[in-house]
Amino acid sequence: MSDSRPYCIAYYKDLEKGYHVSAVVNRLLFEGSDDYGGQIVLASVLGPHSAVRGLLAAMATGREIKMDRYSRARFYGREGGRILTAALGGSSVHGCFVGPTLLKTDEGRAALLGDEPRKVLDRLSQSMALPALPAWAQWICDQLRSKRFLTPLSGMGAAGFTISAGEEDLDRILCEGVRGGALKF
């Protein structure tokens, strides 16, 4: 992608109701690709109150969002996400859409911000009864990546991953590590 701006402009249009709002997005994480778009996991939006609230409401109800940086792509939020807003002064507002996979495990998937192995281990331990030691974090992440259970999120201004391993997958990975001698108590 050749666009080096640290932000993009997001748009939501509803022709039937006559809505057309746009605002600045300075952080965006999504499951998908730059060419096709995908499901929004996290969006940080700045602009006038009505535009920010309109974009966030569209994300929280799964409506289609377009972004100038990703001109051919389509983005969708999802019900179950949360909207947070804070006034910046005047009529400017900062708002965030936090998708359901960042809030909890969703159908065997969870998302997390950052890319540190310890964060992955903490998230797995939080969502499942994972019998793992902190020293195993790097090895577990390497195994999850090699088996394509840990995939990076696309976007700008932030980093994150989606974890798609279930309890059985993690049990199998840990058993292999202990049997093979890579994991020691």
Image (spheres, rainbow, N blue to C red):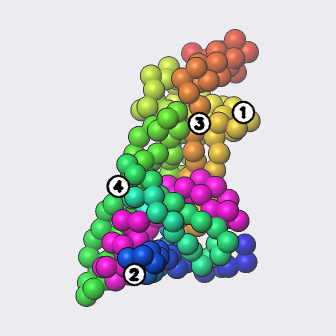
Amino acid type, label 2: Gly
Name the front one of labels 2 and 3: 2
Q: Tag 4 or tag 3, which sits nearer the N-term?
A: 4
Q: CA distance from mark 2 to mark 3?
A: 39 Å
Residue 79: percent from left, percent from top: 40, 51
Circle number at residue 164 = 3
Amino acid type, label 3: Ser
The magenta stretch is 29-58
Q: CA distance from mark 3 to mark 4?
A: 21 Å
Q: Tag 4 or tag 1, which sits nearer the N-term?
A: 4
Q: Give the secondary structure at mark 1.
A: loop
Crowd class of label 3 (few under 14; some 14 to 19; many from 20; radius 10 Å): some
Residue at 59% x, 53% y is 31
Image quarter in which the N terminus is found: bottom right
Circle number at residue 121 = none
Amino acid type, label 1: Lys
Q: Left or right: 16 with respect to 35?
A: left
> Residue at label 4?
82
Name the front one of labels 1 and 3: 3
Residue 9: percent from left, percent from top: 52, 79
Q: Give the secondary structure at mark 4.
A: strand
Circle number at residue 18 = 2
Magenta-drawn stretch contains 48: yes
> Residue at label 1?
147
Residue 110: percent from left, percent from top: 50, 41
Crowd class of label 2 (few under 14; some 14 to 19; many from 20; radius 10 Å): few
Magenta-drawn stretch contains 25: no
Name the front one of labels 4 and 2: 2
